[in-house]
């Protein structure tokens, strides 16, 4: 029998936010896969290892991904990664592909799963706590109330930040665009919040635009709300 590929969300950083189902899936998997050249350096692996000690006894499968937005290069990397995983699944071993947050939100797993599934291998997905939900909880603010709309944008890919519609905006991967975000929000009349490394060492929370730093790390997001 072929093994099953599971996309497992380990949450945003705090290991206590890993679900019981995620823990069980990781414990039962023969192989642990993570995007990157070194699984041990993966943030998702490091989070899981803090609460699942037996993960250190598992076979590790790195799935290198280039830091590029070139669709052709990414497609090649996804195909190569899927082929590596399929070789494991062909031997009958279940594989847990660890992702930060939830596997369905801007995750490499989405592309890997699609290829593996089309090639005839069984797959499954284990939801995780999204970073913006954890950030809102840490900031003690609601994401949406009553009939408010919730807009989730990949800030790193947005050429212009149109924040004109009513409701709450979540700007994911905001670190690279923090200067542009600050400029767009300066005279917007909106409330802005920043969470950097939420649930991880070095966590930083800002509850006002005036507190925003000039530079932010990769694991940063901004929440924008109407006043």
Image (spheres, rainbow, N blue to C red):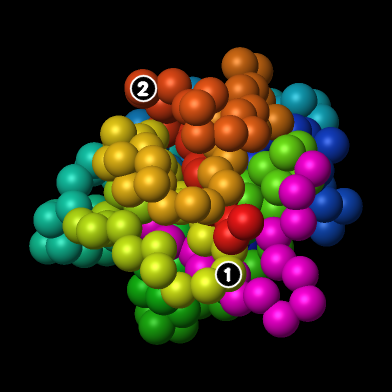
Residue at left offset 38%, top offset 41%: 186
Secondary structure mostly seen in magenta is loop
Tell me where the magenta segment starts and ends, as one range.
140-154
Residue at left offset 81%, top offset 31%: 51
Across and down, in percent, residue 59 comes to: 58, 37
Check residue 21 for magenta coloring: no
* CA–CA distance in space, label 2 to label 1: 26 Å
Secondary structure at numbered mark 2? loop
Across and down, in percent, residue 101 comes to: 62, 50
Q: Nearer the viewer, residue 11 or 194?
A: 194
Q: State the residue position of label 2.
A: 214
Q: Are marks 2 and 1 in contact (CB under 8 Å)?
A: no
Neighbor class of circle 2 (other Cα within 10 Å; few <14, some 14-19, many 20+) is few
Residue 87, visible in the rendered structure: no
- Position of residue 52 in the picture relative to residue 97 (left or right): right
Examine the rendered structure and indicate whether residue 47 appears above or below residue 190: above
Across and down, in percent, residue 90 comes to: 49, 65
Residue at left offset 71%, top offset 81%: 147
Across and down, in percent, residue 63 comes to: 38, 44
Q: Nearer the viewer, residue 58 or 96?
A: 96
> Residue 57 is drawn in which quadrant?
top right
Residue at left offset 46%, top offset 79%: 117
Residue 219, visible in the rendered structure: yes
Q: Identify the disc placed on residue 167.
A: 1
Secondary structure at numbered mark 1? loop
Instruction: Point out the residue furthest to the top here.
Output: 202
Counting residues from the start of the chain, the first of labels 2 and 1 encountered is: 1
Quadrant of the frame with the N terminus: bottom right
Quadrant of the frame with the C terminus: bottom right
Examine the rendered structure and indicate whether residue 116 appears above or below residue 14: below
- Position of residue 57 in the picture relative to residue 208 (left or right): right
């Amino acid at each position: 029998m072929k093994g099953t590929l599971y996309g497992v969300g380990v949450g945003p950083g705090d290991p206590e936010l890993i679900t019981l189902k995620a823990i069980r899936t990781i414990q039962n998997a023969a192989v642990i896969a993570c995007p990157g050249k070194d699984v041990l350096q993966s943030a998702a692996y490091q989070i899981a290892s803090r609460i699942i000690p037996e993960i250190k006894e598992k076979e590790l499968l790195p799935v290198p991904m280039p830091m590029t937005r070139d669709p052709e290069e990414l497609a090649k990397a996804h195909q190569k990664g899927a082929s590596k995983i399929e070789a494991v699944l062909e031997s009958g071993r279940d594989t847990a592909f660890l992702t930060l947050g939830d596997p369905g939100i801007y995750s490499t797993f989405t592309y890997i799963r699609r290829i593996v599934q089309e090639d005839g291998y069984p797959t499954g997905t284990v939801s995780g706590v999204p970073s913006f939900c954890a950030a809102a909880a840490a900031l003690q603010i609601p994401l949406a109330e009553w009939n408010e709309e919730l807009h989730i944008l990949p800030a790193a890919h947005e050429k212009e930040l149109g924040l004109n519609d009513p409701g709450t905006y979540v700007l994911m991967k905001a670190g690279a665009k923090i200067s542009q975000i600050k400029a767009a929000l300066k005279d917007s009349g909106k409330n802005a919040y920043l969470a950097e490394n939420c649930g991880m060492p070095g966590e930083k929370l800002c509850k006002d635009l005036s507190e925003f730093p000039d530079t932010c790390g990769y694991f940063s997001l901004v929440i924008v709300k109407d006043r």
